[in-house]
Image (tube, grey):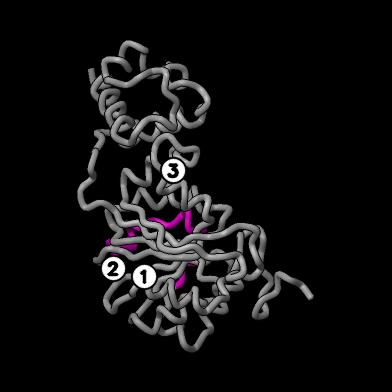
Amino acid sequence: MNNRLYQGHIARKRFGQNFLTDQCVIDSIIAAIHPQRGQIMIEIGPGLGALTKLISKFIDRIIVIELDLNLATRLANNSLLNKKLTIYKQDVMTVNFADIARKEGKLLRIFGNLPYNISTPLIFHLLIYTQVVCDMHFMLQKEVANRLVAQPDSKSYGRLSVMTQYYCNVLLIFDVPPTAFHPTPKVDSTLVRLVPHKVIPHPVYDIRLLQLITMKAFNQRRKTIRNSLDNLFTPVQLIKLGIDDSLRAENLSIIQYCKLANWLSHHLEK
């Protein structure tokens, strides 16, 4: 028997498909999301509809984004869903969520059991749209979830930590064992909640500079920032900013990264 076969569908590795099958976990996710009528709910990667079918009972309509055309067709033909369903048959990385929010006239609530192979780039993509998002709930590989909430001076702390926490308050809701999925993954998972800040705590003038600085620093995280950021800042400039140039990328706080970005923005304007 094909161990990737479930409900007549063979899970496709290239889409990172692992379907939720544990009803207790599914019920707990629905409770954490707490869908309400009138809200704009968007599910990324609905798969066989384990979450979709239950959430649709609480709301008038639901938008789903599904790249696998076989699964999209199954959902479209589901008599319990088709009257409530709007399907985007495309790669979620190409979706403009601002356009959807503009069309709907409301903030978006986004959720999904994210494929492990695209979860990090997808989160970076979604951060672009936080101004039109109410909240996001995602099932992620536990390692990725820990990176989202990681603090300075830890190995899990990285660019994903800085950029996500710049835009959002992040909360780990609960862990999920591999046995809750089919096929069974080799990793534990965690449900996370991301709520965009109403007011950014430490705003930067140019977000592209914060992205640039964090990318350079963490791409060479073994180096001191004196070396990893040497084409952006001199040691003297770092010291004047109150930053020890012998520190490494993982030792700097989000506030310090924002300070560097704002100084660079001001310096480039001159």
Q: Secondary structure at mark 3?
A: helix
Q: Total number of numbered labels?
A: 3
Q: Secondary structure at mark 2?
A: helix
- The crowd level at tag 2 (other Cα within 10 Å; few <14, some 14-19, many 20+) is few
Above or below, comparing residue 91 to residue 127 in the picture: below
When asked about the image quadrant of residue 202, the answer is: top left
The alpha-carbon separation of the residues under discs 3 and 2 comes to: 29 Å
Upstream in sequence: badge 1 or badge 2: 1
Q: Which residues are magenta?
A: 87-104
Residue indicated by mark 2:
104
Q: Is residue 60 left or right of residue 77?
A: left
Q: Which residue is at the front of the view, 41 or 158?
A: 158
Above or below, comparing residue 39 to residue 140 in the picture: below
Q: What label sits on residue 256 in the rendered view?
A: none
Q: Assess whether residue 89 is covered by the magenta stretch.
A: yes
Q: Secondary structure at mark 1?
A: helix
Residue indicated by mark 3:
160
Instruction: Give the residue displayed 47% in from the left and 50% down from the top.
Output: 146
